[in-house]
Image: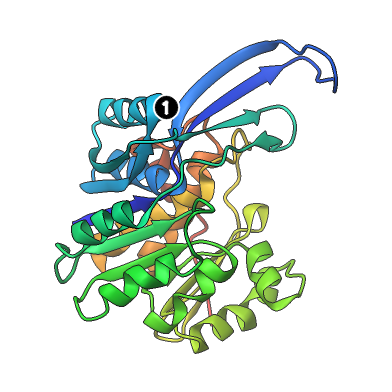
Amino acid sequence: MIYTVTFNPSLDYIVSMNGFEMGMTNRTTGEQMFPGGKGINVSIVLSNLGIENTALGFTAGFTGGQIEREVQKMGLLTDFIRIESGFSRINVKLKDYDGTEINGMGPDIDQVHVNALFGKLEQLKPGDVLVLAGSIPKSLPDSIYSDILERLRNKGVLSVVDATKDLLLNVLQYQPFLIKPNNHELGEIFDVTLNTREDVVPYAKKLQEKGARNVLVSMSGQGAVLVDDTGVVHMLAAPKGKLVNAVGAGDSMVAGFVAGWTQKQDYDYAFRMGISAGSASAFSELLATKTEIEHVFANLESEVEQF
């Protein structure tokens, strides 16, 4: 079974408008609302691909209730922990303004609720996959992901981590199966600018030296790079298509890779599935469907560069 954890899920309120002026009343021309959060996005795409999984995390207040209702309507299996105070965040995204958004804080999560999550994770079995993705509320320490992996150290669980800065760096000692920084996040870790696929390779290998087994680096229009745990470097240019909505593309890449790996245990296939899912979501108003992912997969370059 695959499990995803979203510590800070959201309702994503996506609006379109004809012009935006500071200090004025601005009216929308279109509105959409979806359940959000990186782990939830991974669960949705996995479900779209027909891969059974369970979404874990924390919800609070009326917004948390709506998040749960929306993901259940999508057919997802869920096991959220309800927090009695506060409310799950609302993220406002201005669709026509180059990714401009206002993200909420989310509720405080105390140790009692963290322990409840630990209890659920202790039920994982050898061969299960755990995806830890996204930001955490300010009430939690940057060690929370590594605390989870410490508890799972000897259980034979494959861990996948999509996070930034210390959340990511702190888990490397536990040899996560997969991490997925983008090129900007990778460059931030090492204080460098990484513009090409070739640029990212030595720094991805540095994260392997620190413990990561597989490093998947998303690069938006530049494609992606995978440095796998056999030492092979895979590179692929971005598939051709019209960018419609970049929200969730990186999460979709994680879902595609995990789906591909669980299906065939082949890194080349998993890499292709990852970039296909990420690109298909970027080309779509919503997170990609199985048909959309399969279409991109069928039209990928015939050869992935390997070194």
Q: Quadrant of the N terminus?
A: bottom left
Asked which colour scheme the image uses, the reply is rainbow
In the rendered image, residue 154, in percent from the top left (x then y), is placed at 21, 81
Q: Residue at x 46, y 79 (%)?
A: 172
Q: Quadrant of the C terminus?
A: bottom right
In the rendered image, residue 246, in percent from the top left (x then y), is placed at 59, 41
Q: Residue at x 29, y 46 (%)?
A: 55
Q: Residue at x 26, y 30 (%)?
A: 72
Left or right relative to 70: residue 138: right
Between 83 and 211, the one lying in front of the other is 83
Residue 166 visible in image:
yes
Left or right relative to 129: residue 94: right
State how many labels appear: 1
Residue 299 visible in image:
no
Q: Secondary structure at mark 1?
A: helix
Q: Amino acid at mark 1?
A: Thr
In the rendered image, residue 216, in percent from the top left (x then y), is placed at 50, 68
Q: Residue at x 57, y 50 (%)?
A: 239
What crowding class fits label 1: few (fewer than 14 Cα within 10 Å), some (14-19), or many (20 or more)?
A: some
Judge whether 162 appears above or below 94 on screen.
Answer: below
Left or right relative to 122: residue 92: right
Q: Residue furthest bottom?
A: 209
In the rendered image, residue 140, in percent from the top left (x then y), is placed at 47, 58
Judge whether 9 appears above or below 139 on screen.
Answer: above
Between 49 and 97, the one lying in front of the other is 97
Question: Which residue lies under the disc numbered 1?
Answer: 63
